[in-house]
Image (spheres, rainbow, N blue to C red):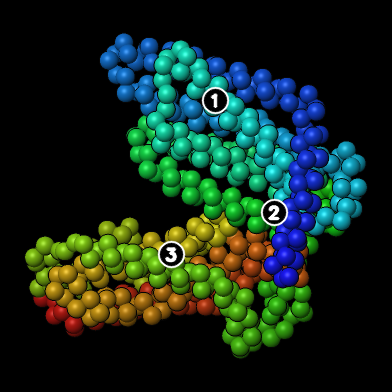
Amino acid sequence: MAAITVNQSSVSWFSGMWLIVRRELRDTFRDWRMITPIVMLTVFFPVLMTWAAGVAQNFVNRFDTPLIAERLIPFLMLIVGFFPISFSLVIALEAFVGERERKSLEPLLSTPLSDGQLYVGKMIASLVPALLAAFLGIGVYLLGLFVFRGWTPPPILLAQVSALTFMEGVVMVAGAVVVSSHSTSVRAANLLASFIIIPMAILVQVEAVILFQAIYDAMWGIVLALVVVALILIRMGVRLFNREELLGREIDSINLRNVFRRAGQYFVAVAPNQPRAHFNLSGIYRHHVPAALRRTKNAILAILVALGVSMVVAWAWGSQFSLPPGALDFSHFSSESFDSAATNFLLPSFTWHAVWWNNTRAVLLYFVTAFFSFGSLAIVLIMLPVAPIAFIGALVSNSGFNPVVFLAAFILPHGIFELPAAIIGAAAAVRVGASLINRDRSLTLGEGWWSAIMDFLKLMIFVVIPLLLLAAIFEVHVTPRVVCAVYGCGG
């Protein structure tokens, strides 16, 4: 009986969602003013690209360089798939805000359908025309190439371009529906669409470089990255969608005084929406910092897992290599050798303040990149300096040295301060980015975002910066002496 109940519930959910899809598709396809321009542009653009491919091929053949034309044709296939999606994006952009301006939003939201059914139904209904237009354009383009040039794409290339086009459509439509559900007018939604179209246009240029270099395997990596971005955008849209807020939203305005006042309240409070409490040096370390760390624990766990995986992979990779004989000869090594190493790592000098500022700047970079990547780039950035440690450990092990002693001498003295500081700073940055897709239901989107930012500032000021200061002092004044004591520097 339990299985039957679950099955019936699933069918009921999908049937409700499908009602929205059918309603939206019917309204879209019967509006000839919207469909006709999309179809005309979708058909005309591939014809133009077919002509352009022929002209380009004839031109380069004059110079006996047919390879350029061979690489240009697949790129034009990507372009032919991308542009119809951008034409059709207007359907997704007015998914909710268009209903609002047509005064049909309230009857739609008063239906007994759940928020998830409404949102997913709207998104699928916006996705279908965009993908139909994209693949219609690719089909017309390939047909023209076959008829006039006798060219057919290799199956693997066709699969890659189709997968890229499909995922680009999903990402763009998912982002457009998020924009539509949080805009107060179609005009505002269209302006915000540039934040969707421009990054995807840049991605198409990156794909062009890959295609011209014939690094076709990298295309699957882009497909996987787009899948992750699409899942993030869909989750963010579903989590943030709220019909009551949608009905009550008026023209948005910015009151900077209230914004900074609210931010200050969050900074001096132990938890959001609580009055100022224990905001002194003792209270900060007894109440504020532990509370902020508890709210950041999931991000800390995610970073620890990512670091563990990266170190295992780096160690496995490093185990395949070995250093040449004499590479680890410390007879000419001295504490001054760290100065030249610092120059190689773009430090102005091997001083505690230069090291401290370099590490602090890295943590601030985690924070900046977290805004644009929902926290994912902060995880990638902290992996970049940690994974090579495992790689070097594997090389040292293959060279006959004890990797534990080597890493303990070179890393441990300052690493006991630097690594926890970097993990806490990166985790707080990840939480800032992830707060946009993992909303605390007890707070509004803005409240949750400001709470995460204030927690980052508190952890940065009272935990990360002091730890990085200690790490810099130890790295400059203690680590070189430990290395020389262990390996007997001869310089």
Q: Nearer the viewer, residue 378 or 178?
A: 178
Label at residue 201: none
Tell me if mark 2 has few (under 14), some (14-19) or many (20+) residues whose alpha carbon lies within 10 angstroms of its own.
Answer: many
Tell me if mark 1 has few (under 14), some (14-19) or many (20+) residues whose alpha carbon lies within 10 angstroms of its own.
Answer: some
Cα distance in 3D space between marks 2 and 3: 28 Å
Q: Which residue is mark 2?
A: 237
Q: Which numbered disc flags the more N-terminal residue, 2 or 3?
A: 2
Please tell me whether mark 2 or mark 1 is closer to you in this view.
1
Cα distance in 3D space between marks 1 and 3: 44 Å
Please tell me whether mark 1 or mark 3 is closer to you in this view.
1
Q: Which numbered disc flags the more N-terminal residue, 1 or 3?
A: 1
Which residue: 65% across, 34% down? 130
Where residue 478 sits: x, y (%)? 29, 80
Q: Nearer the viewer, residue 294 or 77?
A: 77
Label at residue 139: 1
Circle 2/circle 1 CB separation < 8 Å: no
Q: Secondary structure at mark 2?
A: helix
Q: How many marks?
A: 3
Q: Which residue is mark 3?
A: 382
Where residue 279 sits: x, y (%)? 67, 83
Q: Which numbered disc flags the more N-terminal residue, 2 or 1?
A: 1
Q: Is residue 132 visible?
A: yes
Where residue 278 sits: x, y (%)? 69, 86
Q: Farthest residue in the front direction?
A: 1
The answer to which image quadrant residue 244 occupies is bottom right
Which residue: 48% across, 45% down? 223
The amino acid beneath tag 3 is: Ile
Q: Secondary structure at mark 3?
A: helix
The amino acid beneath tag 1 is: Gly
